[in-house]
Image: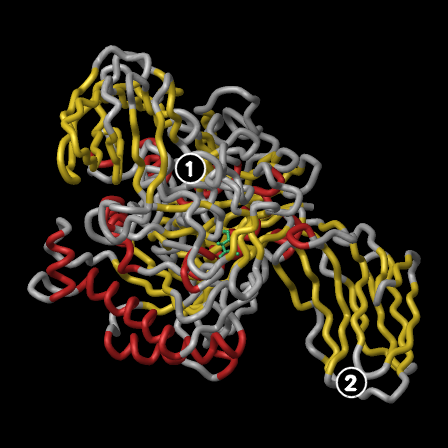
Amino acid sequence: MYGVEIKTSEKLTEVSESLYGLFFEDINRAGDGGLYAELLRNRAFDDGIVPNGCRYDPATKTVVSPTGWVTSFDCCEQEGVAGWEARNGAEFSLTDRETLNDARKRALTIRFGGGTVVNLGFGGIPVEKGKSYRFYMFAKSEEAVKVSVFFNGGEKRRVFEISGDYKKYECELTADVTDNNAELALFSESAAAVTLGFTSLFPKDTFMGRENGMRRSLAERLVKLRPAFLRFPGGCVVEGFSKDTVWRFADTIGPVWERRPHWLLWSYMTTNGLGFHEYLQFCEDLGIAAMYVLNCGMTCQGRCPDYFDRTLTEELYNDAVCAILYATAPADTEWGAKRAENGHAEPFSCLKYIEIGNENYGEEYFKRYESFYRRLKERFPQFTYISTDHTETVGLPTECVDEHFYSDPVFFVTNSDRYDSLDRNGPDIYCGEYAATVGCREGTLYGALGEAAFLTGAERNQDKVKMVSYAPLFKNVGYVSWEPDLIAFDGSRDHVIPSYHVLEMFAGSRGDYVCGHSVFTESSRRIESGCFSCGGTVSDGNVFNLRFGSRVSVRFWDKQRDGEDQDRYEWTVENGISKIVHYNGWSTEVICKDTPCELSADNSAELFAEGDRFRITLNGRVLHEQVIKPVPDLTGVCTVDIAEGVVFTKLVNFSAKEIFVKISCDVQMEDKARHTGVEPKPVFTGIFPPILRQPHSTYASMPSFGFLVLTKICSVKTAMHPTANEFEVIFVS
Ligand code: AHR
């Protein structure tokens, strides 16, 4: 039996206005060539500069950080000039002498001699007939050299006479034809040397028409999600993997050609054109809150961490303070004046949240968090501060904790009740990064259903779970380092994955309060199979016997997969404490409470695991015995919109079968349903069948692996083809 009982008269909690937001990180080339509308690849010729302190290994095309982290350094930057080609006899070379300014480490010296030099963009430069593009370059030449600029294949050209020291040469280019694979070409008859210090090409038609702004189509994708906030700039890019790869605010403001570039740990360079100011401006343009994530004195803890000394940590603290002052101080102060100079005299009132670190944890983090938190809170009390570990557990002041989940869909469904038992006196929760990853790299409907089920739990508990954001947001299909991603794009096109539709539906149906609701469901067993393993011994079957001394670690129900796809349970005994943890993707679940246990010198244990039940016996005594929580077929949440008299009922059918859900309500429901969508076949259309219809209840048929959002004038959308179907069901109070 499946059902939902809705009690509109029971008010569980107010809806959190800030619940659905965005997390943007420059990963998968989401910045330059992506959301940040720059069209030229390697516009400053610095792709391929090895980060300070790191060693490049040409044999493996990797860089090795000072602490030993090895990572890919292979975007053809070491051969030729990434993104640029010399043709028809033109020659060019990179130089590190006489660069445009101190931030620029390289320039490009060209001898055209009747040939051309082209920029290939990020897999082609997309241009549209009749549209205008802003081009500029900083160039110099000892002789007077005429250089023409045009889209390859197009008729229109602009000619510049380059002479003397670096000057900015700029023009608008209009495309004669639509071409998603165009190139920007420079040509000269002269063989005299011309040196380029920095170049740029932007469509004029950016989001809100901003120069140095965002690609309109991608920004509009974000608008449709009705976000309440934007978390930026990372993610791991905030942390870096070495001192030189840490994000620093001060490198990201001012004229873009004066900004120091930054090697992102996702294996490419950014020119930092998408900087602190642009992020804030984007938040303001979207009318949403800004959440700034800062580095608190360490590199990524998953990548051979470097814990910075006091001096460098203080430098980063000051960088954070300057960033906040830049955003908020009046224009007649030092940092406020810089902001005004950059075109925004008024403080950015959108800055609301400060996150101290990203995915940092443990002792080293706690120390730094405390020092940053106490000082920042005293100086800037107006912000909500977010920690990245449960800092309250070690007695530190904690306002909100950012939790991240990357797991399989089943993990998400079974954790849809995760927040039901949250300590109401504890800190708020921000689920800052979540995605069904394991088995879902392409972004699947199955994954989206798992996430949707999890979000019903977040919604039910939005008195404490204040914010959520999917991660990552974007990928350029030509440069993928992490999947799945909510929105995929190339130069001119983009598409979204089912998880996007979940957010579009969920964020589009909010209400004022979460009302009482009970969901009745059948469930299925969670555990399918897996073996035992311990210290190199792997065995199948139901029982695993072992002897051990003072510590032990046994894996069971182990699917024998590694890293991001891992799925196993692990029993450990260390320092007299017995723990059972489920590792799934990058997420963990504590299965039993930590249990103190007395060990002898020679311990004998038996681990029995059958079906979804396990039992551990230590020295003849049962230590743990448990059944793993099953997977509910149906999950859901209900909210009420008072002004509209609407009940939003979000239901997720995670099972592989079609189910009939009895929906009953303490107010009378109308029996009309209107189908406003197109093919494929809707979940139901027209009038509820009379047999099923009663004043206070009705039935909805839910397809296998499907979900509904029901509202008064309410949409019933199916995840099978979420944009294609829309239904209206009228609930009358
Ligand atoms: O979203 C991709 C990465 O996952 C983020 O950079 C990091 O915070 C997490 O590990």
Query: Dot 1 lies on which element?
Result: strand
Question: Amino acid type of disc 2?
Answer: Cys
Query: Residue 191, relative to residue 696: is it above or below?
Result: above
Query: Dot 2 lies on which element?
Result: loop
Question: How busy is the neighbourhood of tag 1: few (under 14 within 10 Å), some, or many (20 plus)?
Answer: many
Please name the residue that numbered disc 2 is placed on. 597
Q: Residue at x 28, y 62 (%)?
A: 352
Q: Residue at x 41, y 71 (%)?
A: 297
Question: Amino acid type of disc 1?
Answer: Cys
Q: Nearer the viewer, residue 223 or 39?
A: 39
Residue 293: image x %, image y %? 37, 61
Q: Is residue 282 left or right of residue 371?
A: left
Q: Is residue 336 left or right of residue 103?
A: left
Q: Nearer the viewer, residue 163 or 330?
A: 163
Q: How many marks?
A: 2
Question: How busy is the neighbourhood of tag 2: few (under 14 within 10 Å), some, or many (20 plus)?
Answer: some
Residue 472: image x %, image y %? 48, 47
Q: Nearer the viewer, residue 8 or 295?
A: 295
Residue 164 at least partly seen: yes
Residue 69: image x %, image y %? 57, 60
Placement of the C terminus among the 4 image quadrants: top left
Residue 672 at least partly seen: no
Q: Residue at x 37, y 73 (%)?
A: 312
In the picture, the disc for residue 714 is 1
Residue 401: image x %, image y %? 45, 68
Q: CA distance from mark 2 to mark 1?
A: 55 Å
Query: Residue 181, relative to residue 252: is it above or below?
Result: above
Mark earlier in primary sequence (2, 1): 2
